[in-house]
Image: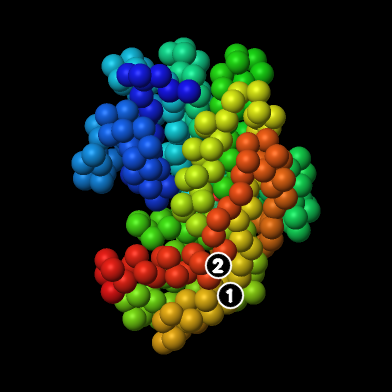
Amino acid sequence: MLKDKQRILVIGAGGQLGQELVRTLTAVFGEDRVVASDIDRTKARYFKQCPFEPLNVFATEHMETIVQHYNIKHIYHLAAILSAHGEKHPMATWQVNLDGLLQVLEVSKKMKVERVFWPSSIAVFGKHSPLENTPQHGMRDAGTVYGIAKAAGELWCQYYYERYGLDVRCLRYPGLIGHRSLPGGGTTDYAVDFYHRAVKGESYTCYLAPDIRLPMLYMPDAIKAALQLMKAPRERIRVRSGYNLQGMSVTPKEIELSIQRFCPDFKVVYEPDQRQAIAEGWPRAVYDAPASKDWGWAPKYDLDFMSEDILMHLMERIG
Ligand code: AKB
C-alpha cells in the first residue's frame, strides 16, 4: 500500500482513461498524492487539482527526476496509440506502445517503484483465438500493430516480474465507454460518439456493422478494476500477463436501441469500413473468472444502466 508522502504518477494522463483515472485517484488518495503527466503540455488544463509534469517517456532521465522528486511508488502507464490509428502509423505505434513501455519498466526497476499498472487490451487476441468466451490463457494472435504491441508488452511485464520482481499488473481492457472526454483512434470509439451525437440531436454514420458484438466496459467499472487490481495483495495476482476483463457484450444496434429509449430521434446509418475487419478479429466476450477469483472483479453496469447514466451526465453538461 501507499504510505504517507508516497505518490502516484499517471503517464499519458491526458487521454480518455487518464483523465478519469486521475479524478478518481485524487478523490481516493488526496490531491497532493497524485502527479499527472502527458507528452502534450496543453493537457495540463485538465489537472487543476494536482501537479502536472510534461513528460515524454523516452526522456528517461527526466522520468527518473520526477519519480525521485515526488517520491513516486506507483505508476499507471497509459500513453498509447489506439488500434485504428495504429494501422495508419505502424512503426510509430510500435515505438510508442512497446518501446515506451520498456522505458517505463526500466525506470521503475532502477528507481524501485513498488507497483506499475499497464493496460493491455482484447486486441491481443486474433482470428485464430477462440472468440466466444475467450479463455484467459488462450491463443493470442493479434492482427493489428496495436494488438501485437499489447501481446508483446504483456510478456515483457511478466518477464520484469519473474526476472526482477517488479510488481507490474495488467488488465486486458475491452472497449471503454466514458462520457467525460472523447477518445481518439480506437475501433470501439463509435460507442462513445453515439452518446455525444444523440445528446446534440445529431445522427451518426457508424464505421462498424450493426451486428458486430464486442465486449465493452463503462468507464467507472474500468477505473474500479484498475484500482482494485493495484490494491490487491501481491500474492493474489496470479496472472502476470494481463487479466481478461468482461463487462457487457453489445452490438452497435443494441447500443443505438438503448439510447433511443431516452433519445427516440437518434438515428444511425451503418457504413462499415476497414475498422470492421479489426473488430471481427476481436473476441465477442472474454472469460474473466480469474480476475473475479483472484482480486474480486465484478462489474456494476449493464447496457441500459450505462446509457441512462451517460445520457444524464451529458444532458446536464451539453444537452
Ligand atoms: C481500441 O478500440 O483500440 C481500444 C481497445 C479495444 O483496446 N478501445
How far from the left and from the top, in percent, is residue 27?
34, 40
The residue that appears at 69% across and 61% down in the rendered structure is 284
How far from the left and from the top, in percent, is residue 220?
46, 52
Q: Which residue is mark 2?
A: 303
| Total count of labels | 2
Q: Amino acid at mark 2?
A: Leu
Earlier-in-chain disc, 1 versus 2: 1
Q: Answer yes or no: do the residues labelled 1 and 2 have beta carbons within 8 Å? A: yes
Look at the image and tell me whether residue 225 can be seen. yes
Determine which quarter of the picture holds residue 313: bottom left
Q: Around disc 2, counting alpha carbons within 10 Å, would you say few (fewer than 14), some (14 to 19), or many (20 or more)?
A: some
**Front tag of 1 and 2:** 2
Which quadrant would the C terminus be assigned to in this image?
bottom left
Q: Which residue is mark 1?
A: 254
The residue that appears at 47% across and 13% down in the rendered structure is 112
How far from the left and from the top, in percent, is residue 248?
61, 61
Q: Left of 296 or right of it: where is 60?
A: left
Which residue is the extreme one toward the bottom?
Answer: 265
User: What secondary structure is marked by label 1?
Assistant: helix
The residue that appears at 38% across and 47% down in the rendered structure is 20
Q: Amino acid at mark 1?
A: Glu
Q: Around disc 1, counting alpha carbons within 10 Å, would you say few (fewer than 14), some (14 to 19), or many (20 or more)?
A: some
Q: Nearer the viewer, residue 119 or 307?
A: 307
Q: Is residue 284 above or below residue 18?
A: below
Determine which quarter of the picture holds residue 6: top left
The residue that appears at 56% across and 19% down in the rendered structure is 166
Q: Is residue 263 above or below residue 318?
A: below
The alpha-carbon separation of the residues under discs 1 and 2 comes to 8 Å
Q: Nearer the viewer, residue 156 or 256?
A: 256
How far from the left and from the top, in percent, is residue 278?
61, 59
The scheme the figure's colours follow is rainbow
User: What secondary structure is marked by label 2?
Assistant: helix
